[in-house]
Amino acid sequence: MKPAIERTLWFVAPFLVIGLAWEAIARFGPFPPKLFPGVEAVAAALGRLVASGVLFEHIGGTLVRLVVGFAIGAVVGLVVGVLMGRYRAAEDLCLPLVSIGAPIPGLAYAPLFILWFGLGDRSAVLLVAFATTFPVVTNVWTGVKTVRPVWIRAAEAMGLSDRQLFRKVILPAALPLSLTGLRLGLARAWRVLVAAEMLTAVPAGLGWLIFGAREFLNTDVMLAGIAVIGLIGLALEKLVFERIERFTVVRWGMVTA
Amino acid sequence: MRRVRGAAGIVLAALAWEALARSGVFPRALAPDLRAVGGALWQMALDGTLAMHIGWTLARILVGLAIAASIGIPLGLLMGRFRPVERFVAPIVNVLMPIPSLAWVPMLILWFGLGNTATIALVVYAASFQFVYNAWAGVRAVNPIWIRAAVAMGADERTLFRRVVLPGALPYVITGFRLAFARSWIAVVGGEMIAASQWGLGWVIFDAKEFLNADVMMAALLVIGLLGLAFERFAFQGIERRTVARWGMVRTAAA
């Protein structure tokens, strides 16, 4: 066998086996077909969602919320993280709050946010922003703190101003960890968003699609929705962040690919 | 000095909250002041409901983690040792991992009904991938020279596994535990909210919303944050210090 064919075969085989097992459970298993639709039904539901254009409306709604919420959270996180890394007072003030706040799942705030900001987009976006902030803060903070002191001293000895020092030394040195923070933040945002959409009853979104379909026992639509969510999550990871990393820190030789 | 400033940060945040609560930006019922939050916490602690909520949440997490570990770790180790297993399982893991576990909640509710089974199933889903992924990475990170040396000294497959591969992979497996706990902590709170049962810290937040008991909600949030912090700080760092750090596998920062 040619290696290319073999590789494809190895890639397809697991999904084939899983698909067959799923189909077998759907046909002969203990669940009624309404609760455990076959592969064909899920594919058909996906086809219907695509053909009617509804799917793109949901994807669009979800992505807009993700981008806006993530942007707010990332900016806040970067600013706070840099301040904490650079100024001892800011670090001492913020660290206890961050350590207590970080382990609280963003979703736990959902009911409070709904009470404060009402059902709908505002709550969902703010929740995403809130969840994004913590991993960004901790990683940017660590990144700025772990800049090698020798570099800073050398730069100061060469007469760099505070601003130059920041732009030329601290920023590039803190970048690998900051990117990790952004990446973790985006992953968090994505997880929170799907659940937040279920709770905040947004007009259109993938989480809402799944949750709404449950009311009518449309399990085929739910599974199609889950599949789309998985694909978008994979795409975010592979297409967005691995690429950003390759173009920045890997290229500058800060980390190896 | 650090302690003083740290305390100052918390006091400042508390004062800011108090000011916000009293300013009337939000109605009083929605933004309870500190005394109300403290009162709610105290009352929940006194009548024993707080202990019940914590107990149920922890029980769900522990059962879910135990199941996930007993599936995930062996699978990950097998993936690391045997190439065909890796080639078969890796694509599935890669596709399933980016799906947020909470997306499965509505489906799990339909399959298992509301209550414990659905919540535990959710924890298992959320935690398994962390175990698989880290055990797998751990085995691959075992220094090949150790394996060759052990084989040269006549270790059979079983001894090799027990004496070399397993300890070598352990730092990663412990990282897996840590990540799995973090994930299940999120999953259990979300799961309890949606797959409503009767007890649980997530459930109490969601239930309190129905009655506009924002003070109870804030109290529960605080407990969730403190418990999460306690687990991270004491349980996991303690385990790490006692095992892998002591065996010289990794260096801990504060050793």
Image: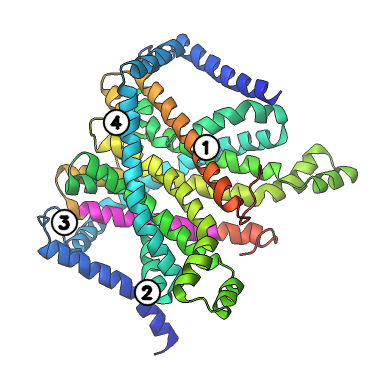
Tell me the kind of residue under disc 1: Phe
From this view, report whether residue B62 is shown above or below residue A235: above
- Real-space CA distance between mark 4 and mark 1, rounded to the nearest whole angstrom: 26 Å
Find disc 2 in the rendering and name its residue: A11
Quadrant for residue B25, please give it. top left
The reply to whether the C-beta atoms of the residues labelled 4 and 3 are less than 8 Å apart is no
Residue drawn where x is 42% and y is 48% of the image: B180
* SS assignment at label 4: helix
Foreground label between 1 and 2: 1
- Real-space CA distance between mark 1 and mark 3, rounded to the nearest whole angstrom: 42 Å
- Real-space CA distance between mark 4 and mark 2, rounded to the nearest whole angstrom: 41 Å
User: Magenta stretch?
Assistant: A221-242
* Residue A60 falls within the magenta-colored stretch: no
Residue B84 seen in the current view: yes
Do discs 1 and 2 belong to a common subunit? no
- Real-space CA distance between mark 1 and mark 2, rounded to the nearest whole angstrom: 42 Å
Find disc 4 in the rendering and name its residue: B203
Tell me the kind of residue under disc 3: Phe
Find disc 1 in the rendering and name its residue: B234
Q: Which mark is residue A36?
A: 3
